[in-house]
Every structure is written in structure tokens, then in C-alpha cells.
Image (tube, rainbow, N blue to C red):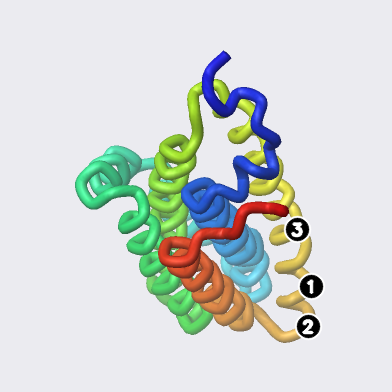
């Protein structure tokens, strides 16, 4: 069997490269889902018709998928880790803009486009970094565990965003997104210079 084929999953996830990738994938998913989920409701509350909501969500969807080749080129050109940091910067701009943009102007559409593209870049770069940290025989288990973490956090973000908006308003989602991104970037940079200790 290949090296690492029988290594416990927890030990694989504790590898610095794998841990950095998982953090990038989870944080970008949470920030994207939390803001995206509440945007149509925000626009509806301000009296926008379905067509206007559709335009904003369409911009978001285009950001999520249309520029994937660009994300791939960036990841190859600068490396997955730098691409992840760039994605965090794009997501931070999107979160800040979404929290401050007037609902009746075009800036909200721009914010949602950037939110989609930041997620796309983080997804492409994070996936590349994840695969660089595992052996071929470990990929299925690692991808499965990572997907579980990502989509579980996505469900929490979808439900939790409604609670946040109900309690303190839509603008708070932007601030929360910025906070999560800051924590995620700090954790990634710390792992880069100070890897996780091996479990005893």
C-alpha cells in the first residue's frame, strides 16, 4: 500500500498544509453563504421586485463560476497559499462593501459579484493546497472529511445568518465576515510559521 494509506484521518487533517486548506475552504464558505443567503431577503424588505433580486444574485453566480479559469491561472502563477490570501482580500472587500452598500444602488451587485469570485478563488486555491498535502491513497478520505466540514459549516452559516440579521441587522454580517476572515488568515499564517504539534 502507498505511504500514509493507513494513517489516521485526524493526523492527516493536522498536517499544516491540510489544515491551512481546510481553514480556507471553511471560512470562505461561511462568509459567502451567510451574506448571499440574506441578500434576497434584504432586497425584498426594501421593496425590490424579483427581477432586481435576480440581477444581483446573477452577478453573484457569475462571480462564483465564470472566472474559474482565471482562478486556476492565479493559483498556478503565485501558488495556492498566496492565492488563498488574495481570495481573503477579495472576500474582505466584498463583505465590507455588502455591509455598507445602499440597497438601492449598484454597489450591492458589485459586492455580491466579488463575494462569488472571492469564494471561487478560495475554493480553487484551497482545493489545490489540500491535494498537495496528501498522498494519492489519502485523497478520498481527506476530501470526504473536508466536504463534511465545509457543508456542515455552510448549513450553520445559512441558519445563523438569519439570527444575526434579525438581532442586529444585515450590516453586521459584513462585520462578522471581516472578523472571520481575519481570524482565518491569522490561523493560516501561524500554521505557516509554527506547524501544529504532533499529537501525543
Kind of element beneath mark 3? helix
23 lies left or right of 111? right
Q: CA distance from mark 3 to mark 1?
A: 11 Å
Q: What's the residue at 37%, 63% (across, down)?
A: 85
**Image quadrant where residue 118 sits:** bottom left
Q: Residue furthest top?
A: 1
The residue identified by callout 1 is 163
Q: Position of residue 97 (x, y in %)?
A: 44, 77
129 lies left or right of 141? left
**Image quadrant where residue 174 sits:** bottom right
Kind of element beneath mark 1? helix
Tags 3 and 1 touching, CB below 8 Å: no
Kind of element beneath mark 2? helix
**Label 2 crowding class (10 Å Cα cut-off): few <14, some 14-19, many 20+?**
few
Q: Is residue 193 above or below residue 21?
A: below
153 lies left or right of 23? right
Q: What's the residue at 68%, 37% (across, down)?
A: 9
Q: CA distance from mark 3 to mark 2?
A: 16 Å
Residue 54 at least partly seen: no
The N terminus sits in image quarter = top right
Amino acid at each position: 500500500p502507498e505511504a500514509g494509506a493507513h494513517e489516521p484521518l485526524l493526523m492527516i487533517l493536522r498536517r499544516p498544509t491540510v489544515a491551512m486548506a481546510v481553514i480556507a475552504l471553511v471560512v470562505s464558505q461561511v462568509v459567502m453563504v451567510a451574506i448571499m443567503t440574506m441578500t434576497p431577503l434584504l432586497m425584498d424588505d426594501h421593496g425590490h421586485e424579483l427581477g432586481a433580486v435576480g440581477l444581483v444574485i446573477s452577478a453573484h453566480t457569475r462571480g462564483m463560476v465564470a472566472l474559474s479559469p482565471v482562478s486556476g491561472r492565479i493559483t498556478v502563477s503565485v501558488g495556492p497559499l498566496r492565492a488563498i490570501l488574495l481570495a481573503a482580500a477579495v472576500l474582505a472587500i466584498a463583505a465590507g462593501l455588502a455591509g455598507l452598500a445602499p440597497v438601492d444602488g449598484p454597489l450591492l451587485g458589485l459586492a455580491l459579484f466579488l463575494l462569488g469570485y472571492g469564494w471561487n478563488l478560495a475554493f480553487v486555491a484551497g482545493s489545490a493546497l489540500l491535494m498537495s498535502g496528501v498522498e494519492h491513497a489519502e485523497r478520498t478520505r481527506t476530501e470526504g472529511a473536508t466536504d463534511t466540514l465545509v457543508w456542515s459549516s455552510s448549513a450553520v452559516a445559512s441558519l445563523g445568518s438569519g439570527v444575526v440579521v434579525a438581532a442586529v441587522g444585515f450590516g453586521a454580517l459584513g462585520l462578522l465576515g471581516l472578523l472571520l476572515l481575519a481570524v482565518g488568515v491569522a490561523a493560516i499564517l501561524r500554521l505557516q510559521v509554527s506547524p501544529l504539534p504532533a499529537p501525543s
